[in-house]
Image (spheres, helix red, strand yellow):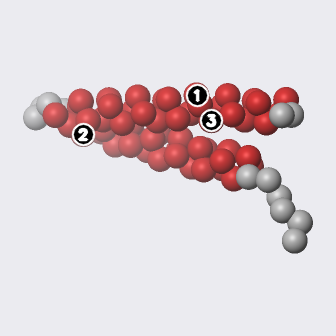
Amino acid sequence: MYPDTEALYQKLAELTHEHRELDEAIASLQADPDHDQFQVIRLKKRKLLLKDMIVRIKSQLIPDLNA
């Protein structure tokens, strides 16, 4: 495995972990009837950004196939 590939897998693991943590934080906030809607929106935007970054890294890890 190339060093760049290892770094991508490490970054992917970090982003996936943060994405999961945000999901839990959002669920926790929404369980509270007096939750701060703006904070939920900010967390959801961050979660979407992380998802985009995860998808981008996963596509970089797919090997190019010469047909």
* Three-letter code, disc 2: Gln
Q: Is residue 61 left or right of residue 2?
A: left
Point out residue 6 in the picture as x, y percentages from the top left corner.
Answer: 76, 30
Quadrant housing residue 57: top right
Which residue sits at x=67%, y=28%? 10
Provide the residue designation for mark 3. Answer: 12
Q: Is residue 39 in sight in this rendering? A: no
Point out residue 7 in the picture as x, y percentages from the top left corner.
Answer: 75, 30
* Front one among 43 and 65: 65
Quadrant housing residue 34: top left
Which residue sits at x=24%, y=39%? 37
Provide the residue designation for mark 1. Answer: 14
Marker disc for residue 54: none
Which residue sits at x=58%, y=28%? 14
Q: Is residue 6 in sight in this rendering? A: yes
Q: Kindly state the secondary structure of the residue where label 1 is placed.
A: helix
Work out whether mark 3 precedes mark 2 in sequence or the reverse, and give the earlier one. Answer: 3
Report the mark closest to the observer, 1 or 2: 1
Report the mark closest to the observer, 3 or 2: 3
